[in-house]
Amino acid sequence: MRKNIVAGNWKMNKTFPEAEKLMKDLLAYKSKESTHCQVSIVPPSIYLSLAREIFKNKEVGLFSQDVSKHSHGAYTGEISAAMLQSMQLDGSLVAHSERRAYHRENDTLAKEKINALLAAGLRPIYCNGESLEERKAGKHLEVVKKQTETALFGLSEEEIKKVIIAYEPVWAIGTGETASPNQAQEIHSLIRNLIAEKYGRETAEEISILYGGSVKPDNAKEIFSKPDVDGGLIGGASLVLEDFIKIIQAFD
Ligand code: PGA
């Protein structure tokens, strides 16, 4: 059966000493408490090597915030899947809504990045979700369907099982607005059903679909209780250890 996952996306936050402290505090927590979900962090890439050192026994999963579609070469500022793999990381976010908004990423590019990660033996956390305008126009189901099909449906059955999906309605990210548990469930079950139609129910049941967008200690439990919500991609609340721990404990 699929795994429950709580992943903290730090985005562009924390100085080096702050990042080191947060990682060490998280390690201290993980060393004394057992958790009922897989815990991962997605720090700025410049801190991934520090993170690998601190979590050397893989107590916490480590993901990059982005990856290049290219394998290597003259692409200043980019990071390849092979580099992530050589540091024994777990994978990378792909097509986070902030990458879509500020770097014009789309699902065709997402598909290439997903392929690059899978070829290196890494796991993509593929993010999708509709904008406020699209939801207001009642197009959210259609938008997420198209995104999912474009980015994922060229994969083989074995490949898609390695993908983690994060549904992140753009209007709920960093805004304090959260999708209601029922709104999240509606889209999560849509995604799972699309996968089931294409790859079979058994495969669809193995894929973790996370919700992201203003998950906080006081709403995590209710959102995670929905049958097709397998955890969360947590932004703001992952920067404060106490809040992140409370969200992890929503699975207790
Ligand atoms: P947020 O971000 O929890 O701050 O809304 C979630 C995300 O973008 O991954």
Image (tube, grey):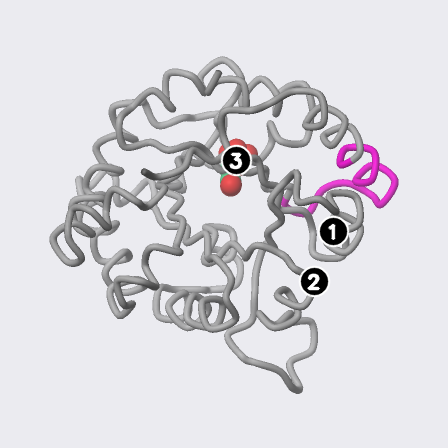
| SS at badge 2 | loop
Q: Magenta span: helix, strand or loop, mainly?
A: helix
| SS at badge 1 | helix
On screen, residue 127 versus residue 75, left or right, reads left
Q: Position of residue 249 (x, y in %)?
A: 54, 18
Let me know if residue 91 is in the magenta part: no
Residue 174 seen in the current view: no
Q: Are marks 1 and 2 in contact (CB under 8 Å)?
A: yes
- Residue 100: image quadrant is bottom left
- Residue 156: image quadrant is bottom left
Q: Is residue 81 above or below residue 174?
A: below
Outermost residue toward the top? 218
Which label belongs to residue 38? 3
Mark 1 burial class by Cα count in 10 Å: few <14, some 14-19, many 20+: some
Q: Amino acid at mark 2?
A: Met
Mark 1 and mark 3: Cα distance apart in space = 16 Å
Q: Position of residue 22 (x, y in %)?
A: 77, 33
Q: Position of residue 32 (x, y in %)?
A: 71, 21
Q: Amino acid at mark 3?
A: Gln
Q: Earlier in the sequence, mark 2 or mark 3?
A: 3
Outermost residue toward the right? 17
The number of callouts visible is 3
Quarter holding the N terminus is: top left
Residue found 62% across the figure and 48% down from its top:
62
Residue picked out by circle 1? 52
Give the magenta-colored segment's residue range: 11-23
| SS at badge 3 | strand
Q: Earlier in the sequence, mark 1 or mark 2?
A: 1
Which label belongs to residue 87? 2
